Amino acid sequence: MQPTDFKDPLPQHVAIIMDGNGRWATERGMSRVRGHVAGVQSVREITTECARLGLGSLTLYAFSVENWKRPSTEVRYLMRLLRVFLRRERKTLMKNNVRLRCIGRLHDLPAGALKELRRTEEMTRKNTGLVLRLALSYGGRSEISDAMQAYGRDVLAGQADPEKVDEESLRAYLYDPETPDPDFIIRTAGEMRLSNFLLWQLSYAELYVADVCWPEFKKQALWKALAAFGERHRKFGLSPEQDGGRKVSSSAGKTSS
Ligand code: FPP
């Protein structure tokens, strides 16, 4: 497959559940953490390719709230990988005009990783190309419950009116309300579940499951996924007569049912 094999429109915001690092390594007789190391190469290649293609945002599920329950050696290793990744990738992010943002319960992260993360966010703040969002210590349910807590505080302070609450006002309490919802969600390693990822934001995203494990998901696999997106027919709850039987289009401004 070539990058010319898929046609516009491309998704504006791609979200990826990077699954299968452990399986990839175990199948090759290596320790699970070697799979995470190999996964970093895919993070680098896919980010660079999304930037080159001119996508608006890429959100990667890098560490979930549930992942803290993994063996402490694996957790420590992942946190170290994150720190090293942030330090090493800054130059490339700057070169590719990529802005880094992070979502999740970031206060849970070790101080060293958090410091590198804030530095990278600050350094790339003015970049105008792709927004790379890393979901870290992230859970869709915790995002919604954190939003409800913040909303409740505003109600108590007299700054929000429960009678007027609607989808738009609730969205303002999510971790990153400015970024449009993903229109395309990719999961690797063949699993067909959302695993507590962006539960609010994925309501109308097109789903795509790649059979390959994340360390094997490189730009050819991304092109294949984007070609599949181009063939989808997005209805947003309308009937075929109402939406004219169109293929993909932006979700901006659409209402749902
Ligand atoms: C899932 O594979 C992957 C993760 C829990 C972590 C994802 C992390 C990376 C790709 C590397 C670090 C990322 C950054 C941004 C530095 P798994 O271990 O659940 O695989 P399995 O299902 O085969 O066990």
Image (cartoon, rainbow, N blue to C red):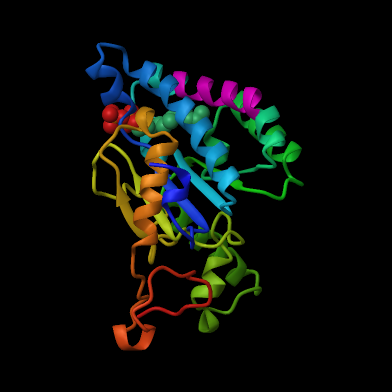
- Give above or below for 92 relative to 126: above
Q: Is residue 55 visible?
A: yes
Judge whether 106 appears above or below 157 on screen. Answer: above
In the rendered structure, which segment of residues is drawn in magenta?
A: 77-89
Q: Which of 151 and 75 lies nearest the eye of the viewer? A: 75
Q: Is residue 69 visible?
A: no
Q: Find residue 63 and report its image quarter.
A: top left
Q: Does residue 87 show up magenta in the picture?
A: yes
In x, y percent, where is residue 154? 61, 67
Quadrant of the image containing the N terminus: top left
Ligand 1: quadrant of the figure: top left
Residue 41 as seen in the image, left or right of residue 102: left
- Residue 41 lies, in percent from the top left, at 48, 25
Q: Residue at x 38, y 27 (%)?
A: 215
When the figure is inspected, residue 160 is found, relative to residue 202, above or below; the finding is below
Image vertical order of residue 134 relative to residue 111, above or below? below
Residue 49 is situated, as x and y percent measured from the top left of the image, at 53, 40
Magenta run includes residue 211: no
Q: Nearer the viewer, residue 40 or 11?
A: 11
Position of the C terminus by quadrant: bottom left
Between 51 and 147, the residue placed more toward the observer is 51
Q: Position of residue 68 (x, y in %)?
A: 40, 31
What secondary structure predominates along the stretch shown in magenta?
A: helix
Residue placed farthest to the bottom in the image?
241
Please tell me how many numbered marks the rendered image carries. 0
The residue under the point 34% across, 82% down is 238
Residue at image point 30% right, 83% down? 240
Displayed quadrant of residue 97: top right
